[in-house]
Structures are given as C-alpha cells and as structure tokens.
Amino acid sequence: MARRFQDYVTGLLTGKFVTGKDPHGKVYKEFKPFKVNQYPTLANLRNALGSRVTEDELQIGEALRYRALDIDYSVFNKSDSDKAFLKRIKNAHRSTLAKAGFNPSKRLNISQPHIIRGK
C-alpha cells in the first residue's frame, strides 16, 4: 500500500510482470504498472478520433506543437524612399573607402591587417 500515492512516472517505472494467456492458449508476460497513467496516448487518441483530425491538429490540441502562423511579410519590405536612402549611404561609404586607398570591391586582409591587399 506504500505505492498507492506515487506519481505516475514512479508508478510506471516500478511495475511488475504478470503472466497471462492469450485466446489461443499461449502464455505471455505483460508489464503491469503499479499506478496506471490516466491520460490517453496519442495513438489511442488518433484511433478514437479516426480520420476527422489530422496529426498536426491532434498535437496542437494536446499542446505539443504550436499552431502555424500566417505572417504578413509585406510589412517588412522597404519602401522606395528607404531603398534610395540606403543606396546613397552605400555609395558614399564606397567613395570614402576609395579616397582612403582601398578598393571597395575587394576584401580586406583580416588575418594580416598591416598588409593592405585591397589597392
């Protein structure tokens, strides 16, 4: 009786094997937990609901997966004025690099910064 108030995990882990017979008379051993989980498994839910509910809807209903979101990506698009502004900034930066003696089309030598390869 000490196992009566155990939690489900401990009850499932501390069960015992019980000998039984199938309808054909064959003897088998079956694991019986001391405390049975009262919640149905996903396989049992899927069989009970049949084809009315998809796997995704079942997992969303059981809070195992989030619902798919419809995101309006047009909110993140830049306007034409923003694009023109960013293009002006980029060109100004490239001209500043060219005045300093670097070729903006080539990469700078990061591993050996004292050697300038961009000229």
Image (cartoon, rainbow, N blue to C red):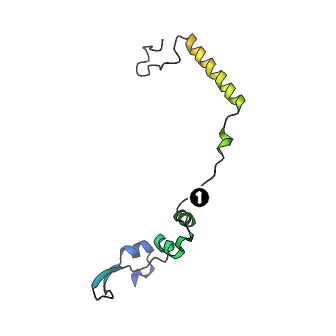
For residue 62, what is the image quadrant?
bottom right
In depth, the one of 70 and 4 nearer the eye is 70
In depth, the one of 106 and 112 nearer the eye is 106
Q: Position of residue 67 (x, y in %)?
A: 59, 58
Identify the residue at horizontal 28%, vertical 89% (top origin): 25
Marks counted in the figure total 1
Q: Position of residue 23 (x, y in %)?
A: 33, 88
Residue sticking out furthest to the front: 51
For numbered disc 1, what is the local secondary structure? loop
Quarter of the image with the N terminus in it:
bottom left
Q: Position of residue 32 (x, y in %)?
A: 36, 80
10 Å crowding of disc 1: few (<14), some (14-19), many (20+): few
Identify the residue at horizontal 49%, vertical 74% (top origin): 47
Identify the residue at horizontal 48%, vertical 18% (top origin): 106
Q: On the picture, is 42 further left or further right than 78?
A: left
Residue sticking out furthest to the right: 81
Q: On the picture, is 6 further left or further right than 59?
A: left
Q: Which residue is mark 1?
A: 67
- The kind of residue tagged 1 is Arg
Q: Position of residue 33 (x, y in %)?
A: 38, 79
For residue 112, what is the image quadrant?
top left
